[in-house]
Amino acid sequence: EIVLTQSPATLSLSPGERATLSCRASQSVSTYLAWYQQKPGQAPRLLIYDASNRATGIPARFSGSGSGTDFTLTISSLEPEDFAVYYCQQRSNWPRTFGQGTKVEIK
Amino acid sequence: EVQLVESGGGLVQPGGSLRLSCAASGFTLSSSWVHWVRQAPGKGLVWVSRINNDGSDTRYADSVKGRFSISRDNAKNMLYLQMNSLRAEDTAVYYCVRDLGGAADVWGKGTTVTVSS
């Protein structure tokens, strides 16, 4: 099973700041990595698929990069609605696995 | 509008069974793989199972293998998850998720399963 490790666990930032979230895989997943955003009481929302492709309707301030074992989700300038939990997920191998999540909170 | 709506959750005793349903609307379910993903209270997301377009191939997490069974009825645009021998650790919100070419782009709102005596 591929283990995805997200860091940091919590990121405390102010609106307008840049957020950089990391996801590291225990073995290569090529570019088969996605990022999701989840707000309290809501279902997750797809942000990025295949490492760097923004999903439909996702603002340009969200970008993804990386390949192999190291991936990054960047939010260029945090909006109030971006404070949430973010998960990465790999689709390279079965079983599909998620990271444990990074909470982006208001500083 | 493209959406998935789960139903069938509830309170069940350990060792009991439940069948979750997921109704698709706004698109043809047969055009995509579909997954079940769950989330225990206050915890992260966990992948549970996947079924391919025509139902000929299924995959399961080790934690549910042999107890859960995923199926679909494309004629009815429906997905199912039969859950047997339920345990306390199966308590979670269960999400139905469309997978279109590798992008899990549509999620239902979830249905809550509570396993408790």
Image: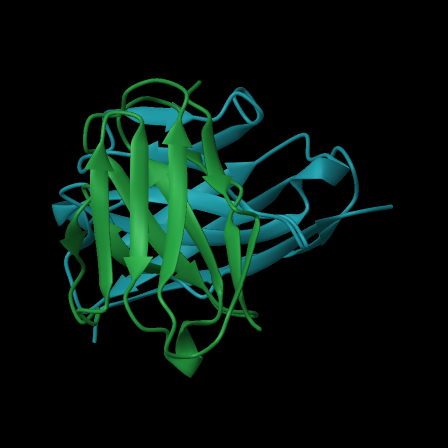
Q: Which of B110 and A90 is in front in this view?
A: A90
Q: Which of B57 and B62 is in front in this view?
A: B62
A7 sits to left or right of A78? right
Find chain A in the image and tell me its colour. Answer: green
B80 sits to left or right of B54? right
The reply to whether residue A53 is in sight is yes
Chain that appears cyan: B
Q: Which of B6 and B100 is in front in this view?
A: B100
> Where is residue A74 drawn, in percent x and y?
30, 57
Q: Which of A27 and B73 is in front in this view?
A: A27
Q: Is residue A61 above or below residue A81?
A: above
Count up the numbered dots. Answer: 0
What scheme was used to colour the molecule?
by chain
B3 sits to left or right of A55? right
Please give the name of the residue rendered at 21% of the width and 76% of the height, measured from the top-left corner: B1
Q: Residue at the right extreme?
A: B117
Q: In this view, does A79 lie above or below A72?
A: below
Please give the name of the residue rendered at 35% of the width and 65% of the height, measured from the top-left corner: A18
Q: Image quadrant for the C terminus of chain A? A: bottom right
> Where is residue A9 drawn, in percent x and y?
57, 48
Please give the name of the residue rendered at 56% of the width and 27% of the height, measured from the top-left corner: B64
A2 sits to left or right of A55? right
> Where is residue B109 drawn, in percent x and y?
45, 66
Q: Is residue B61 above or below residue A88?
A: above
Q: Is residue A91 above or below residue B79?
A: above
> Where is residue A67 drawn, in percent x and y?
21, 31
Q: Residue B108, located in which quarter of the rendered image? A: bottom left
Q: Image quadrant for the N terminus of chain A? A: top left
Please give the name of the residue rendered at 24% of the width and 25% of the height, measured from the top-left corner: A68
The reply to whether residue A96 is in sight is no
